[in-house]
Image: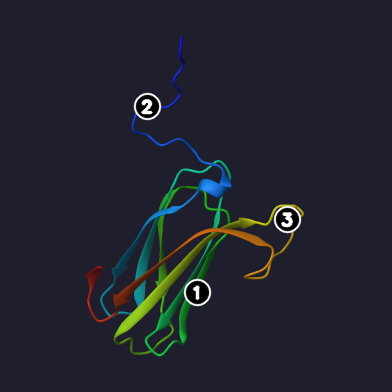
Amino acid sequence: MRIQFYEDGVPSPRPPEEVRFNQLGLYVYPGGRQVAIGFDVTPFLERPSIEVTVTNDDGRVAATLTVVEAMQPNFNLTMHLRDQEPTGLYHVEAVLYYPAPGSAPGERHTPGSGRMVVDSISKSFNATQVGEQ
């Protein structure tokens, strides 16, 4: 007799090397200085971390965000842009990662080091257009 732990159609939690972004949603608030970023990640066995960087059209960093060990595969957060008068296009880069194999538990990692990147996603938005993009 086969025992089924999950209903058909419901994805089972994945190991770190199989975790991916399914979708990255963006919603620009009136005024253009706040952007809600929605994350949809495959279900996971181990909690991943996410690093987000928003750059303006000139290539300058307008906002950064780090999610340390996400609790849920689907959530959203609001980012505040540094630009006093947001105009034009902004570019979002989100990186999904885990501590590198062999790292000591609780070891502090600087961005870009001591981590195993499993996925990344990029998207652009216009800060002058309120709503979902």
Amino acid type shown at disc 2: Glu
Task: Please identify the quarter of the rendering in which residue 131 is found.
Answer: bottom left
The relative height of residue 6 versus residue 81 in the rendered view (above or below) is above
Q: Is residue 45 left or right of residue 81?
A: right
Q: Is residue 30 left or right of residue 107?
A: left
In the displayed image of the protein, which residue is found farthest to the top?
1
Q: Which residue is mark 3?
A: 106
The relative height of residue 130 versus residue 86 in the rendered view (above or below) is above
Q: Position of residue 107 (x, y in %)?
A: 74, 59
Amino acid type shown at disc 3: Gly
| Total labels drawn | 3
Q: Nearer the viewer, mark 1 or mark 2?
A: 2
What residue is drawn where x is 56% and y is 42%?
15
Q: CA distance from mark 1 to mark 3?
A: 22 Å
Task: Please identify the quarter of the rendering in which residue 109 is found.
Answer: bottom right
Q: Position of residue 3 (x, y in %)?
A: 46, 16
Q: Which residue is mark 1?
A: 64
Amino acid type shown at disc 1: Thr
Mark 2 or mark 3: name the one nearer the start of the chain: 2
Task: Please identify the quarter of the rendering in which residue 8 is found.
Answer: top left
Position of the C terminus, as image quadrant, is bottom left
What element does badge 1 sit on?
A: strand
What element does badge 3 sit on?
A: loop
What element does badge 2 sit on?
A: loop
Q: Nearer the viewer, residue 58 or 131?
A: 58
Q: CA distance from mark 1 to mark 2?
A: 38 Å
Marking on residue 7: 2
